Image: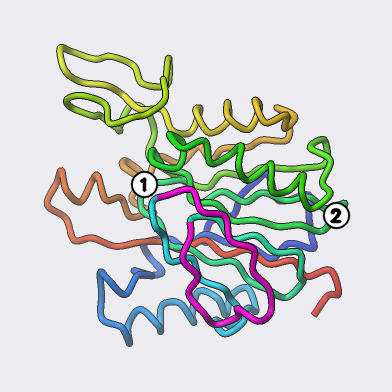
Amino acid sequence: MYRLKTLAKFPELMHGVSTAEEGNMAEKWGNKEEVNRNRRRFLDKLNIKIGDCVMASLELGIRVMRVGGKDKGMYVDGDVLITSETGVGLWMVTADCHATVVYDPAKKILALAHLGRQGLDGGLPGLVINKFRQLGSDTGEITVAAGPGIKKESYTWIGKLPFKRDWGRFAEKTGEDGYLLDTGEFLKQQFIEAEITKQNIGVSEADVFSDRRFFSHVRSVKNGEPEGRFATVVMMNWLGN
């Protein structure tokens, strides 16, 4: 299990990122019974039950969904899950995109966001912070912890960029028709623009393409390897139960 260093100062948060050693966590890429066993074994280490989790059914979009106890054990369509309830696990599976925890300990608001090129192109970090503001958050209280994702040196895009916004230095030209995409630094910049304190933003140093502790869709396609997905889960546990 992998832990996000940025969240270490919050003992009330139960969280973890699964590794490839703990198995594939997505039904699309494996036998359903085996995937369920992998999920249970992973969550058991955190003393979290799968039935206490709300699972993101990712759309590769910018929809922010507020969830609570009524949604436990269910899949919810959207790329961000946000809750203000304790005992509600937020769950998503990824391969190259950054599963990103956003947390306001003062207002007890927690979110898990899927931040890849589509979400970043749609300005999803800013939308998440706007939702926190609507719920009463002061941006100075918010911490952001982005999990493992593909790094710039490993993420090459060939051909015309399919983006609506200017990525600037985060899409570096390489060769005649190629670009290196820096999603980790771009998400950090977007959170800074949303007035999150720079020191409160952490991005995992792990590059899932080269770090075989994690699954990578890009690596699977490039090397002809079997597909798989790793999970990120986070839950507020203020009452200690």
Residue 200 left/right relative to 121: right
> Residue 140 at what x, y percent from top left?
82, 35
Q: Nearer the viewer, residue 41 or 134?
A: 134
- Identify residue for label 1: 96
Q: What is the number of the mark on residue 107?
A: 2
> Residue 112 at what x, y percent from top left?
59, 56
Which residues lie in the magenta part?
61-78
Residue 213 left/right relative to 140: left
Residue 156 left/right relative to 205: left
Q: How are the colours assigned in the image?
A: rainbow
| Residue located farthest toward the left when viewing the structure as drawn | 224
Q: Nearer the viewer, residue 89 or 78?
A: 78
Report how many numbered discs are placed on residues in the image: 2
Q: Is residue 126 above or below residue 66?
A: above
- For badge 1, the amino acid type reads Asp
Query: Looking at the image, which residue is at 33% across and 55% down?
Result: 215
Callout 1: 10 Å neighbours few (<14), some, many (20+)? many
- For badge 2, the amino acid type reads Lys
Q: Secondary structure at mark 2?
A: loop
Q: Secondary structure at mark 1?
A: loop
